[in-house]
Every structure is written in C-alpha cells, then in structure tokens.
Amino acid sequence: MPHNSTADLPVSSSAANRSDQPFDVIREVLDDGSQITNEEAESLNKKNICSEQRLKEEPGSESGDIFSENGEDYPNHKTINHYHQDKRRMSLTSLVAVDPPSSQDAPTRRTINLGHGSDLIYIQRFLPFQQSWSFFHYLDKHIPWTRPTIRVFGRSCLQPRDTCYVASSGLTPLVYSGYRPDAYSWDDFPPLKEILDAIYKALPGSRFNSLLLNRYKGANDYVGWHADDEKLYGPTPEIASVSFGCERDFVLKKKESNHEKTGDCGPAKKKLKKSSKEDQHSFTLKHGSLLVMRGYTQRDWIHSVPKRVKAEGTRINLTFRLVLDITKRFPNFVADQKCDSWNFEVKKDQKLEALDVSEFLSNLLQV
Ligand SMILES: O=C(O)CCC(=O)C(=O)O
Ligand SMILES: [Fe+2]
C-alpha cells in the first residue's frame, strides 16, 4: 500500500550488525529443501547464462568496460552451473548453497574521475553473492511492481521496465516523464533498510531518503538516455545504485548541447556527432554491486541501460536518492522540471529576499 504513515527512514538500524544473515522470509524459502519447479529452474538458469556469458554489444555502441576485473566473477558460478545440469531434481537450497566468500572476494572499490567535478565509485562485490540472491528473490516477490504509462517527448508509452518507489513521508513527490509514483514506506520492506545500512557503511556521511526500484524482465527491458537531474535532488545529487540478478551494461555519455535524445519511447533522432572515447563509458553492473554517481554527473552526463539480446534473465536495480526539502519552503520550484537552469530560476523568483537566498542555498548544499 502507498504510504502515508509517519514512519521515517532510519539512518541506521540493528540490521547493520547482521548483514550476513538473510532476513527471515528468505531463510524460510531457502531452507525448506523443497523441489524446485521447472519455472524456477528455468528462471535461475537464465540468470546464470546471463551472468556467465559476455554480453554482446549492440551495433553502434562503444565498449570499454572500465569496471570489470579481468572478466572474473564469483568463483561459485561453476557450482551453480553444475547444479543446473539436472535442474528437475535439484532443490532451491542446492542452487544457492554456494561456497562461502574467500578473502579473494573482498569488495574492491574503484573511483572513476569523469572530470569537471563528476565522479563515480564502483564496488563490484558490495554485497555477498548468496545474500544478494536472497535480496533478489525477496524483491522480485514482495515489491508491488508496476509498469506505468509515461510521456516522453509528447508521446505516451508503456515504461519499458517495472518500477516502484519508496520514500520517507512528507517529501516532495517525485514526478518524472509525467508520472508521479505513489511512495511506499520503508517499513513495508524491511530488507531495504538492510541494504541501506550497508550503503551507509560504505559511504559514511551520505544520506538517502528515497528509492526508485527498477525491474528489467529480460533483454527487451531497458532505460533510455536520461539524467536524474530533477530539481528535488539539487544540483549535485549523490545516487547509490545497487544491482541484483542478470548483469546489464550501464552506459554513460557526456551531454552535448545538441545531443540526440531517445528516452524511454525509442529513438527520436539520429546521432550527428560521434562521441570521443572520453565522452562515453560502458561497463557491466554485476550481481551484488554498488555504483555511486556523484558531483556534477547528473548535470554533465546522461546514462542508460540499453537493450541487450543476451540479457535474458531478470535484473533488479535500486537507486537510492536524497530529496531535498527546498520545494516545501519554496513552492515555486516544481519537482517535475529538470534543473538545467538553477541560477536562472533562483534569480527569476522575485519573492526571494536576501535571507531566503542564503537559506535556499544552504538547503541545496545540505547533506
Ligand atoms: O538500472 C540501472 O542501472 C539504472 C536505473 C536508472 O538510471 C534510474 O532509475 O534512474
Ligand atoms: Fe538514472
């Protein structure tokens, strides 16, 4: 149910101390030893195919996996592949009974400087492999996924992926592509707090109060070129993105004044100028990984998760964001607008007095 409760986002919880223990719902499912159905086996098999094969690039897109670690993945993939050979007889428990992580699996953290105040952090093994599958199954089953009709460049279309929105109460609502999702409460999905606690450990000092969830149900689901530069996030939003399930490519491209736009409704215009290498980065987001976009990344770059023929399995992505409270104090700032023109908007608001301006700016800079 959409939330209107007073429950607010906890900054930390006891869950932080038991991040290696999957939550109860999942443990019940995994420990029951029941025979796996054909459908489950098929779905898990697809995930495995998806994560083991190198994803084929679509013609025209440039490859440069700046985050892959020599193509290595979790060593336990072999174990899973073996179980898949006789999928009718294997149990769900066997499927996830992977080797405990060794010291080689320790998370590695990489910072990628995109220049001009934009940067990324990538942690490939942010959450343990097995626990990540537990999160995947929980989210796949318990999140009330919806596939809304959105408007992009004047056209209505079905959003090419499932979505759900979770946020603390009382925040400025999120509106994108003419769609205003109802916000569910964090209390409705306790595992999300565990994931958030893990993020807080990795990013001390960061704060998030909203979460956009996306589910890509196969190769044809995607997110078109966009930047998460809505005004409610301020000019330098930090966005923490956690991925589960099928690996998908994530492509970042530097904004051009006349860059082509595709959005979620398909191509609109042919590209005129070829991007240089530094202007585009393409890489694979692994199961259990964390990607953080910071600084001016939303102002200066656009990103997408393109269709990929071989990406047959389901992928779930969570993007944690901080909604600033500026629109409560300054209702002239409409959440649906993009923030290409922050300075202009500030000057244009005749009602802003000197004191207001400093309050406005400190609101923007609040973390
Ligand atoms: O699925 C992803 O990795 C990205 C999702 C995204 O860009 C968004 O929700 O704004
Ligand atoms: Fe995005």
Image (cartoon, helix red, strand yellow):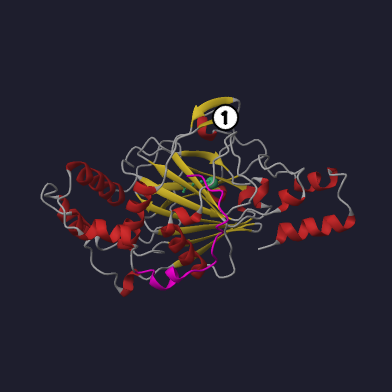
Which of these two is toward me, 318 or 21?
21
> Would residue 12 be counted in the magenta stretch?
yes
Please identify the quarter of the rendering in which residue 30 is found: bottom left
| Residue depicted at x 22% and y 45% | 40
Say if disc 1 is inside 8 Å of ligand 1. no
What is the span of residues highlighted in magenta in the rendered image? 1-20
Question: Could one spot residue 68 in this view of the protein?
Answer: yes
Please identify the quarter of the rendering in which residue 94 is found: bottom left
Which of these two is toward me, 53 or 10?
10
Q: Is residue 53 above or below residue 68?
A: above
Residue 70 screen position, x and y as percent: 35, 60
Which of these two is toward me, 2 or 176?
2
> Would residue 342 be counted in the magenta stretch?
no
Count of number-bearing discs: 1
Q: Please, what is the dominant secondary structure of the magenta stretch?
A: loop
Q: Secondary structure at mark 1?
A: strand
Q: Is residue 242 above or below residue 301?
A: below
Question: Could one spot residue 73 in this view of the protein?
Answer: no
Residue 305 screen position, x and y as percent: 46, 43
Q: Amino acid at mark 1?
A: Arg
Q: Which residue is mark 1?
A: 151
Q: Is residue 141 left or right of residue 84?
A: right
Please identify the quarter of the rendering in which residue 367 is found: bottom right
The local crowd at label 1, few if under 14, some if 14 to 19, many if 20 or more residues have their Cα within 10 Å, is some
Which of these two is toward me, 224 or 277?
224
| Residue depicted at x 71% and y 41% | 334
Residue 365 screen position, x and y as percent: 71, 60
Residue 256 screen position, x and y as percent: 64, 41
